Image (cartoon, rainbow, N blue to C red):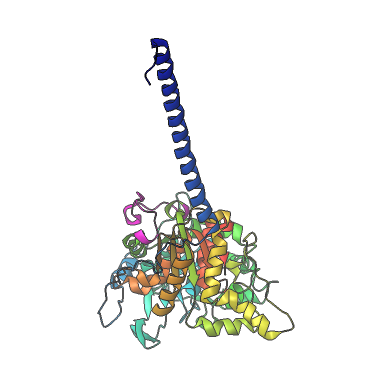
Amino acid sequence: MLPSSLREKDGLARQGLHLRFKTRRYLVLAVIAFAVVTVFGRALLAWFGVPRAFRDAYPPPLPPPPAITSPLPPLYENYHHTELSLPQHHWDQRRPRKDEKYLFVAGHSRGCGWGNAMQELLLNAYMAYKAGRSFVFANYTWNDNGSPYSDYNGKKIPSLIPYSSIIQGPIVGAPFPFGDPTPLAVHRDYFDHVCPKKVTFIREDISEIIDFKNSAKEIVDGWHDKLADVDEPCVQTAINSGQIFNFDVFGDPRAMIDIWPELSASPILTHFGWSPLVELAFDTNRDMFLPSLSIEPYLTSLPYTTNADRYAVIPGLMALHLRRGDFAGHCEHLAGYPAEYNAFSSFPGLPDPFVPPRGPDADENRAAFRAHCYPTLEQIVTRVRELRRTHAARGLRKLYIMTNADEGFVRELREALWRDQDWQMISSSRDLVLNWEQRHVAQAVDMLVGQRAQVFVGNGWSTLTSNVVMMRMANRIRPDSTRFW
């Protein structure tokens, strides 16, 4: 029926316009509401770690690393030559100048993993720094019997690896920060060249006179006072007296508490860095760690500044350290004590302090201990889900597994974690693309990743974990993001 007048026609037109406006407004509101619900729903998924039923059952496969067919491991001759060519090495000298004094810990660790060697190296270097003497560094040593290669579980490994292939900074001869008068570190070969005669002390010269034998501060202060009265420039510890900082020290949860404020503020840590070889491995594999479309510069393209500036936290990354292999027996051994966490994994303020179980049932105690030291696949998945609900874990997208586990276990774990949670990528140490020289320093690559992760989960009895925790604490990464099994 047509309108009977112009006024009626105009009224109907306005009514239609009003209806169209209201419809459009409600449509806009509906779209906004849908977007809010969608975003909020995804936030809940990320926050509470709710499994997504529509995900593929298996994570997308990663390309296998290229095979390296060299029959023998590298000997790192170029790194050794570079160390001997440091500008502070004056090979034409036959004795130290009046202003030169050295300290070499000849009883340093041998035949142990990189985590053990690294934490000892840092403390030895700090002891020399505190004494005002040039630190004398040697090599990461599996054995020093003169053979270029050693056997480890039926495989050839280098007997000696130059420290500069693993780390950089004042510990291996780089300059101290501007204005620091500490003399530069020198290589052990140069020390032997310029110091044919040496004054030798034994570990017990200090350990027998201090009150708390495992206190790193008392040990360092004791050697400082001892060396303050020594005029001889060439000082070493006896090789047969062993490590100054040994297993008893690094295994005592109280050992590092009193020294930490001064150690963490020293150039030994503030100007510690990973070697260009290690950083290149990180750069090569950075898609496993960095956010998608990251514009972060390659580490190897940047001039060196400081530990904290160079190795900033990677948002969205969770790193898990899982020790397998020989740790099955080692955890059983530790449970027999039962042992507390290592010193660098026992900082006050970390959210997962460990109290060894001492109940009446020995089997229950061992099972409780094992959950922290050698967790099962199911326990790992449960712990990751639990930690992903914490405030420090908001926004996690990538997961990296630092492990020495066999490929079968890594595959099963990766699949279980993928099914349980929403991850953009899950990768592991087994997926790293490494060259011939990087393969034998791969633990350092894992340490660099763990140090930078938004959330790190480690093993409190592993020295690799301990070093990662130490670097995170030194760089003032929020303590609630450093967790344990």
Asked if the magenta segment contains residue 307, the reply would be: yes
Q: Position of residue 335 (x, y in %)?
A: 63, 82
Location of residue 24 by image quarter: top left
For residue 298: magenta? yes
Camera-nearest residue between 123 and 455: 455
Identify the residue at the far front of this view. 1
Seen at 25% across and 79% down, the residue is 69
Query: Magenta span covers which residues?
Result: 287-308
Q: Residue 418, percent across and down? A: 44, 66
Q: Is residue 405 above or below residue 260?
A: below
Observer able to see residue 231: no
- At horizontal 33% and vertical 83% (from top left) the residue drawn is 148
Q: Quadrant of residue 184?
A: bottom left
- Relative to 28, is 418 above or below? below
What is the quadrant of the N terminus in the image?
top left
Q: Is residue 482 above or below residue 206?
A: above
Left or right, residue 187 beside residue 357: left
Q: Residue at x 55, y 69 (%)?
A: 382
Name the foreground residue: 241 vs 471.
471
471 vs 362, left or right, is left
Residue extending farthest to the top is 6
Q: Position of residue 185 (x, y in %)?
A: 43, 64
Is residue 135 visible in the rendered image? The answer is yes
Q: Main secondary structure of the magenta part?
A: loop
